Image (spheres, helix red, strand yellow):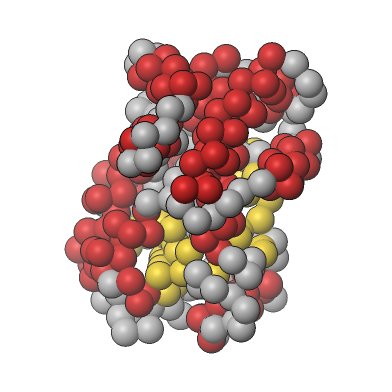
């Protein structure tokens, strides 16, 4: 039964991940969920519709300039190239108690968002284990994955974390709140740096990486450079974190595609600067070489 206790949940970005999450939230809170989008984007979505696993979702929309009322929760699910605009678009919806969650890839979006709207509004977050693919106006997935989120330290859960947990429970959105959120973010960064980039260069689905072979070796080599880098930043990823990554990979639809491969196939700008670009920049601070990521960076840049 829909829950009416939450007044305003606003979301930016209806790609594969954003659409999956928005659909689940809409089912639980149909009168509370609104998509922030300009009029042109609204018209496009309304004309084509949006279906998630065969179900058409009729979202409510609100324009960035039409900010009124404090949002309980804002979820940012755009690509990195749209982040700067997204930060501007949410400002009119931020009240004293608004919680903001970013589902962007990489390890830098929270800092940028916090600088724009205030760090006190942020919870750290990322999505993992989803195999959602968006083609035109249709989103399909077999594994909804989960949202990993929390404060930097979650030994004791804050009221904000408890609020989001309750909301996700009602929306049947799987989640995890790790004790050490910073390490969890780095673990996802390692995973993305490996699988996203290798899949984009090889133009290969998840299945190519689920069994031993050259594709998996390339993925693990790129991820290994992140593991080495993490030591210098006090995070200390280990082989156990790589093993956890491989377990998650094994649960994904073998025909599914990473977000970066979907971007390459659609001719969109990739997020390689968030992955190899970040590895190279952070490694330079410690004179660390990252030859695999350097190679991937050059190859992916040449794909567009």
Residue nearer the viewer, 46 or 53 = 53
Residue nearer the viewer, 207 or 293 = 293
Q: Is residue 287 visible?
A: yes
| Residue that lies at the very extreme toward the front in this rendered image | 287
Which residue is at a point 75% across and 42% down the rendered structure image? 243
In the picture provided, is 116 more to the left or to the right than 142?
Answer: left
In the picture provided, is 50 more to the left or to the right than 12?
Answer: right
Q: Quadrant of the C terminus?
A: top left
Which residue is at a point 33% across and 41% down the rendered structure image? 285
Provide residue 92's location: percent of width, then percent of height. 23, 70
Residue nearer the viewer, 188 or 44 = 188
Q: Can residue 58 be seen in this view?
A: no
Residue 228 sits in which quadrant? top right
Which residue is at a point 35% across and 28% down the rendered structure image? 269
Residue 209 sits in which quadrant? top right
Provide residue 57's location: percent of width, then percent of height. 55, 52
**Vertical order, 296 against 37 (above or below):** above
Provide residue 113's location: percent of width, then percent of height. 31, 60
In the picture provided, is 202 more to the left or to the right than 80?
Answer: right
**Vertical order, 135 against 169 (above or below):** above
Provide residue 63's location: percent of width, then percent of height. 27, 60
């Amino acid at each position: 039964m829909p829950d009416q206790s939450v007044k305003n949940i606003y979301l930016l970005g209806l790609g594969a991940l954003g659409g999956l999450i928005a659909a689940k939230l809409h089912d639980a809170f149909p009168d509370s969920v609104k998509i922030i989008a300009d009029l042109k984007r609204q018209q496009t979505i309304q004309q084509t519709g949006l279906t998630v696993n065969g179900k058409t979702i009729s979202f409510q929309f609100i324009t960035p300039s039409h900010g009124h009322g404090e949002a309980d929760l804002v979820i940012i699910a755009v690509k990195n190239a749209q982040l700067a605009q997204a930060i501007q678009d949410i400002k009119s919806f931020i009240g004293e108690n608004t919680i903001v969650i970013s589902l962007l890839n990489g390890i830098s979006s929270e800092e940028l968002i916090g600088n724009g709207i205030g760090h006190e509004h942020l919870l750290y977050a990322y999505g993992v284990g989803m195999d959602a693919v968006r083609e035109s106006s249709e989103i399909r997935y077999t594994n909804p994955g989960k949202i990993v989120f929390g404060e930097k330290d979650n030994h004791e859960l804050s009221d904000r974390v408890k609020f989001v947990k309750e909301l996700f429970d009602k929306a049947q959105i799987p989640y995890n709140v790790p004790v050490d959120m910073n390490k969890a973010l780095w673990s996802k960064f390692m995973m993305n740096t490996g699988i996203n980039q290798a899949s984009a260069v090889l133009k290969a689905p998840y299945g190519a990486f689920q069994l031993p072979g050259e594709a998996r070796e390339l993925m693990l080599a790129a991820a290994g450079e992140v593991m080495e880098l993490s030591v210098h930043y006090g995070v200390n990823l280990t082989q156990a974190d790589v093993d956890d990554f491989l377990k998650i990979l094994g649960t994904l639809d073998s025909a599914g595609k990473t977000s970066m491969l979907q971007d390459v196939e659609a001719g969109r700008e990739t997020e390689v600067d968030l992955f190899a670009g970040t590895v190279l920049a952070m490694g330079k601070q410690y004179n660390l070489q990252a030859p695999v990521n350097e190679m991937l960076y050059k190859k992916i840049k040449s794909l567009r």
